[in-house]
C-alpha cells in the first residue's frame, strides 16, 4: 500500500495549489487512497455526497493530477467503503497482519534533490550522519526552522536513505497531529496496545511539527513513554519543529530535556546564492528552460520560503505555457504581480524594528531609545541594533543616531555581542528568527 500513499500525498499537494481552501478541505483532504489493482486507482470516500461531487465536478482534475504524478493512465475509481472490491480489501488486511508500516514518504524528498547552502549546511550534514548510522550519531536529532525551509525534505531523505540501505528496517514517519489523532482513536476503540506496538516496535521514528503537542497533556504523556521505549532500545528518533525546544511553550520539562539530549540543528531562510541554486535545481529536475535573469528576479523578491520560491517558478512556467509566450522578465513580472503585491508590506524602518523588539521583550520603545542600561533593557536594545544592521541598508553611525544618538562603536559592540551569542545560544537563534518573521510581516 505504500506506493499509492506516496502517489496520493504528491497529488494532494498539487490539488491544494489548484483548488480553493474550502473545496480542498471539504472534498479532497478526507479522501483515503485505498489501493492499486488491475490499472485502477481506488479512492475511498465516507459519504455519497462526497462521491457525487468528486465524480461530477472534480473528476477531470483528479484524473489529470494523478496521471501527472504517476506517469500512468490509471482508471480513477471513487467508492464508498461498502463498495470496495473484496480482493483489494483482503490484500489490505493481509498487509496489516504482516506488519506493513505506512511510511507516507514523498519520493522526491531525497538527499540528492536537497540544495545545500550556508543556511542549512549543519542540518543537512547531521541528517546524513543519522541516515548513515541510525542511533549511533545524534539521537535524537532535532531539526527546527520556519515552515517551508526543508525540514520535512530532510526527514523524508533520512527515511529513504535508511530504507535504500536496509529494506527490512521499520521506519515510520508521521506528523504530531497524526500521532495525536491515532492516540485518541486507540483510546476510543480500546486499542491502546496496538497503538503502542505500532510506535514502539520500530527502528526509526520521524515525527514532524512536534510543537503541536505542546498543549496536549495526554499526547505529551504518551510520547514521553514512546520516546523512552525507543531510546532505551537504541532506536533512532528524529523530530522537527518550527522553534527550538526551549521556546516550545507549555512543553513538559521532561520532554524538553530529552529533545535536548542529542543534536539540535536549525535551518535558516536561504541566502540569495542558495535561492538561485534551488531554482536551477527545480528547473533541471522538471526540464524547464528558464533564463537566468528570471531566476534572479524570483530570488530577489522571495527570500524566506523555499515552497513559495518554487511555486513562483511553477506559476511563471504555467503562465508562459497557457499564453503561448516565451519566458521573460516581463512575463515573470506580469504572472507574479498579484503575489508580490500581496506580500508587500510597509517598508522596513528602524522605528518598526524598535516597536516589534520592544513588544517582544515587554518594554517601551522609549526605553530602547533612551540611556538606561539595566540588562532587561540593554539586551533588547542590542538585539534591535543587530536586526537593524541585518535588515536595513543603513550605516553604523545612522543606527547609533536612531538609538538615542549613540556612537557607532556602541553599535559595533552590540553587533559583536549578539553575533557571538548566536553561535552558542539556540534559544536566541529562535528568537531572532521569530522577530525577523514579524518584522517582515510574514
Image: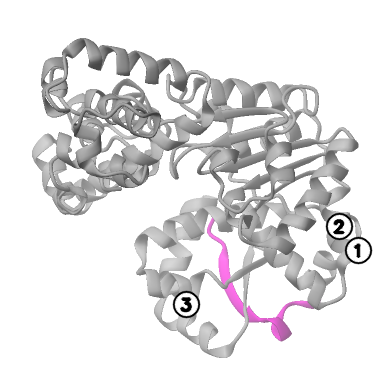
Residue located beneath label 2 in the image: 196
Identify the secondary structure beneath mark 1: helix
Q: Nearer the viewer, residue 187 or 358?
A: 358
Residue position for label 3: 26
How many neighbours does mark 2 have within 10 angstroms: few (below 14), some (14-19), or many (20 or more)? some
Q: Is residue 125 visible?
A: yes
Residue 332: within the magenta? no
Whole-angstrom CA distance, mark 1 to mark 3, is 32 Å
Q: Is residue 107 left or right of residue 428?
A: right
Whether tag 1 and tag 3 are in contact, CB under 8 A, the answer is no
Give the quarter of the image for residue 108.
top right
Q: Name above or below for residue 254 compared with residue 122.
A: below
What's the CA distance linking mark 2 and mark 3? 31 Å
Q: Is residue 353 above or below residue 210?
A: above
Magenta residue span: 72-87
Percent position of residue 168, x then y:
85, 38
Q: Which residue, as the protein is rendered here, is positioned at the far left?
A: 330
Check contact, mark 1 vs mark 2: CB within 8 A: yes
Q: Where does the image place residue 288, in percent across and percent down from the top left?
A: 32, 35
Q: Residue at x 75, y 22 (%)?
A: 137
- Camera-nearest label, 1 or 3: 1
The residue shown at (16%, 23%) is 399
Q: Indicate whether 361 appears above or below 380.
A: below
The quarter of the picture where residue 289 lies is top left
Seen from this angle, which residue lies furthest bottom? 48
Answer with left or right where residue 361 lies relative to residue 174: left
Label 3: how many Cα within 10 Å (few below 14, some 14–19, many 20+):
few
Amino acid at each position: 500500500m505504500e506506493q499509492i500513499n506516496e502517489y496520493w500525498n504528491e497529488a494532494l499537494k498539487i490539488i491544494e495549489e489548484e483548488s480553493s481552501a474550502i473545496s480542498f478541505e471539504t472534498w479532497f483532504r478526507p479522501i483515503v487512497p485505498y489501493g492499486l489493482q488491475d490499472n485502477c486507482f481506488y479512492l475511498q470516500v465516507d459519504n455519497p455526497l462526497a462521491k457525487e461531487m468528486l465524480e461530477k465536478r472534480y473528476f477531470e482534475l483528479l484524473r489529470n493530477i494523478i496521471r501527472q504524478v504517476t506517469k500512468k493512465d490509471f482508471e480513477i475509481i471513487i467508492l464508498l467503503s461498502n463498495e470496495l472490491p473484496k480482493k483489494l480489501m483482503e490484500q489490505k488486511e493481509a498487509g496489516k497482519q504482516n506488519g506493513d508500516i505506512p511510511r507516507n514518504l514523498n519520493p522526491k524528498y531525497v538527499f540528492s534533490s536537497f540544495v545545500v547552502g550556508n543556511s542549512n549546511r549543519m542540518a543537512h550534514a547531521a541528517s546524513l550522519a543519522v541516515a548513515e548510522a541510525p542511533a549511533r550519531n545524534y539521537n535524537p536529532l532535532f531539526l527546527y526552522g520556519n515552515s517551508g525551509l526543508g525540514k520535512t525534505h530532510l526527514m523524508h531523505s533520512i527515511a529513504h536513505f535508511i530504507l535504500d540501505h536496509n529494506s527490512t528496517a521499520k521506519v515510520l514517519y508521521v506528523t504530531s497531529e497524526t500521532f495525536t489523532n491515532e492516540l485518541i482513536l486507540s483510546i476510543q476503540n480500546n486499542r491502546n496496545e496496538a497503538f503502542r506496538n505500532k510506535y514502539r516496535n520500530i527502528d526509526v521514528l520521524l515525527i514532524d511539527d512536534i510543537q503541536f503537542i505542546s498543549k496536549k497533556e495526554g499526547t505529551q504523556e504518551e510520547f514521553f513513554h514512546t520516546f523512552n521505549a525507543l531510546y532505551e532500545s537504541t532506536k533512532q528518533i528524529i523530530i522537527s519543529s518550527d522553534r527550538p525546544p526551549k521556546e516550545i511553550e507549555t512543553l513538559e520539562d521532561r520532554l524538553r530535556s530529552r529533545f535536548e539530549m542529542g543534536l539540535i540543528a536549525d535551518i535558516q531562510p536561504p541566502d540569495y546564492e542558495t535561492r538561485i541554486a534551488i531554482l536551477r535545481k527545480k528547473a533541471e529536475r522538471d526540464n524547464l528552460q528558464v533564463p537566468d535573469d528570471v531566476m534572479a528576479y524570483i530570488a530577489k523578491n522571495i527570500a524566506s520560503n523555499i515552497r513559495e520560491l518554487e511555486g513562483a517558478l511553477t506559476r511563471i512556467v504555467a503562465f508562459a505555457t497557457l499564453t503561448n509566450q516565451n519566458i521573460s522578465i516581463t512575463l515573470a513580472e506580469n504572472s507574479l504581480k498579484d503575489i508580490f503585491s500581496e506580500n508587500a508590506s510597509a517598508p522596513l524602518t528602524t522605528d518598526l524594528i524598535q516597536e516589534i523588539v520592544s513588544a517582544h521583550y515587554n518594554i517601551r520603545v522609549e526605553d530602547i531609545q533612551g540611556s538606561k542600561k539595566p540588562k532587561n533593557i540593554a539586551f533588547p536594545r542590542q538585539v534591535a541594533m543587530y536586526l537593524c544592521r541585518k535588515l536595513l541598508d543603513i550605516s553604523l553611525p545612522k543606527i547609533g543616531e536612531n538609538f538615542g544618538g549613540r556612537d557607532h562603536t556602541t553599535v559595533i559592540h552590540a553587533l559583536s555581542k549578539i553575533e557571538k551569542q548566536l553561535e552558542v545560544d539556540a534559544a536566541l537563534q529562535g528568537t531572532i528568527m521569530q522577530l525577523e518573521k514579524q518584522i517582515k510581516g510574514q
